[in-house]
Amino acid sequence: MKINIKNKGFTLIELLVVIAIIGILAALIIVALSGAQRRARDTQRKNNAKAISLAMEQYAVDNSGSYPASAQANFPVPTYDCPTAITTLITASYMSSNAICKDPTTGKTASYAAYSTGSATLGSSYILAWLLENTQEIAKTGTSGNGVYGPTSGSLTVNGLTLTGLDATTNVKYFVVYGPQ
């Protein structure tokens, strides 16, 4: 009498195939998540810019249409403290802290500029720009409106205000907000 013994389990080849498939899927997920993280940090930068812009507008409403002045007309890459205009907003309680100035990647102050025209203490306009990580953002054409811009020569003019000292490397993008709105 012959006894049939059935092998229960997987062969070595089957196990290796499954491990290879899991490895490929894990690699794809990691690549997809890194792009999502860059986009999420850029979204945080954009939201910070919009929050500061709203604080600037509220300040202007309360101060006869004048914005807090800033000595910065060039784009600092990077600066490690809030521009004078933003410090003024914090001191005057339009913003709660300078945490909004922090870059989500490094924890240091984001690369941006605040510029206002007018007297030494009050300005008639401002421009804020944040350097974005996601170079796949579609840049606006033209020179007006809040949004993503890609400088071509180291400077950028939006709504008549010019930022200089910008990175003109191919595919570099900046998120720009300006006022008055």
Image: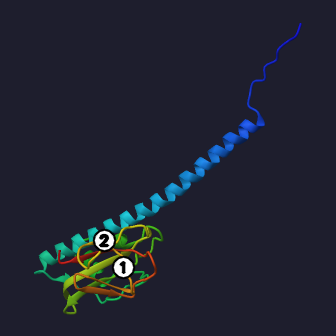
Tag 2: residue type? Ala
Answer yes or no: do the residues labelled 1 and 2 have beta carbons within 8 Å? yes
| 78 displayed left or right of 72 | right
Residue 112, numbered circle: 1
Q: Amino acid at mark 1?
A: Tyr
Instruction: Kindly indicate the quadrant of the structure image that contains residue 93.
Output: bottom left
> In the rendered view, would you say 117 is above or below 137?
below
Query: SS for tag 1?
Result: loop
Of the pair 7 and 75, the residue shown nearer to us:
7
Task: Give the quadrant of the N terminus.
Answer: top right
Q: CA distance from mark 1 to mark 2?
A: 9 Å
Apparent side of residue 137 relative to residue 59 in the rendered image (left or right): right
Seen in the image, is 108 located left or right of residue 140?
right
Q: Residues within 10 Å of mark 2 (few under 14, many from 20)?
A: many
The outermost residue toward the front is: 141
Farthest-out residue, top = 1
Image quadrant containing the C terminus: bottom left
